[in-house]
Image (cartoon, rainbow, N blue to C red):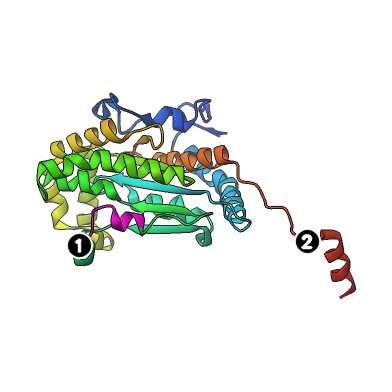
Amino acid sequence: MAKDKKDGKKSKKSDTPFADALRAGPGTDISAIDPRSTPSFDGDKAAGQEALADLTEPVSELQERLFAESRSGGERSVLLVVQGMDTSGKGGIMRHVVGAVDPQGVEITSFKAPTAEEKKHPFLWRIRNALPSPGMIGVFDRSHYEDVLIVRVHDLVPRAQWSRRYGQINTFEEGVVDKGTTIIKVMLHVSKDEQKERLTERLERPDKHWKFNPGDIDEREHWDAYQEAYQAVIDKCSTDDAPWYVVPADRKWYARLAVMNLLKEHLEQLDPQWPKADFDVKEQQARLAES
């Protein structure tokens, strides 16, 4: 535990699992969630960073157990879907959460605008091709939800077409779960003011210019439409099979801590086991000693 700098009190993780505190379902009003809040954690930034570091070893072990399980025929895997507005911290999640575990057991896919080849196929085609293999943690930086977010906001396809996609997504995710993949869907919930501050920093610092895209300012003009689109995603696609978790993201350190805890809690629920040796251990020890 760490002491809060303001009042000297020791801070600690709440008894409420992050998955319970952050789960959002139909009827959850995302506009009522404070983007600066820290559900399930009452510590400050320093305490949060310390807690995140402490999670690296247990999460890495759980990941290795999942990977090892697949080598003896296990079919289970995990898919972490990360969505959020520009500057919401998706890159930080990739570096500080996903980057904390063994890269051999992770498959990251960043979804951009569809290529000419991808446009020839149904919108879920490229998603199916990127699903994690058994034993792996798959990570989607953006995902199939772009096809009911940006597509909806900018009228890229007729309303009748994108409105059907919610049901198609639910059916698709149900099938993915049935085949042994645990889906963790995260919306990084950042405020419009915080986004402006982060974009301002990118413009003021030469070492951040590469991160800036003039189109980000254009997209801010559609802020309210994006919030409506995200609300529809929560209402229509947060299911028992694949619920959504809304992570307050104005505090980058908290968002990273929350996603790491979500990953840990889901892996703990899976409880992957080390596979038993398919050889006589003592015999091989004796052989090795004599070699």
Residue identifier under label 2 = 279
Q: Position of residue 177 (x, y in %)?
A: 44, 43
In the image, residue 67 sits, relative to residue 189, either above or below, namely: below
Is the residue under label 1 in contact with that under label 2 (CB below 8 Å)?
no
Q: Amino acid at mark 1?
A: Lys
Q: Residue drawn at (30%, 29%), measured in percent from left and top? A: 34
Residue 122 part of the magenta segment: yes
Q: Residue drawn at (33%, 48%), measured in percent from left and top? A: 89
Q: Position of residue 221 (x, y in %)?
A: 10, 43
Q: Quadrant of residue 19?
A: top left
Q: Residue drawn at (11%, 47%), measured in percent from left and top? A: 154
Q: Which mark is residue 120?
A: 1
Which type of secondary structure does the marked residue at label 1 adopt?
A: loop
Q: Position of residue 7 (x, y in %)?
A: 47, 26
Q: Which mark is residue 160?
A: none
Front one among 40 and 265: 265
Residue count near mark 2 (Cα–Cα under 10 Å), binned few <14, some 14–19, many ≥20: few
Q: Position of residue 204 (x, y in %)?
A: 21, 55
Front one among 12 and 239: 239
> Which region is colored magenta?
121-128
Q: Amino acid at mark 2?
A: Phe
Residue count near mark 1 (Cα–Cα under 10 Å), binned few <14, some 14–19, many ≥20: few
Relative horizontal placement of residue 103, taking residue 34 as reference (left or right): right
Quadrant where the C terminus sits is: bottom right
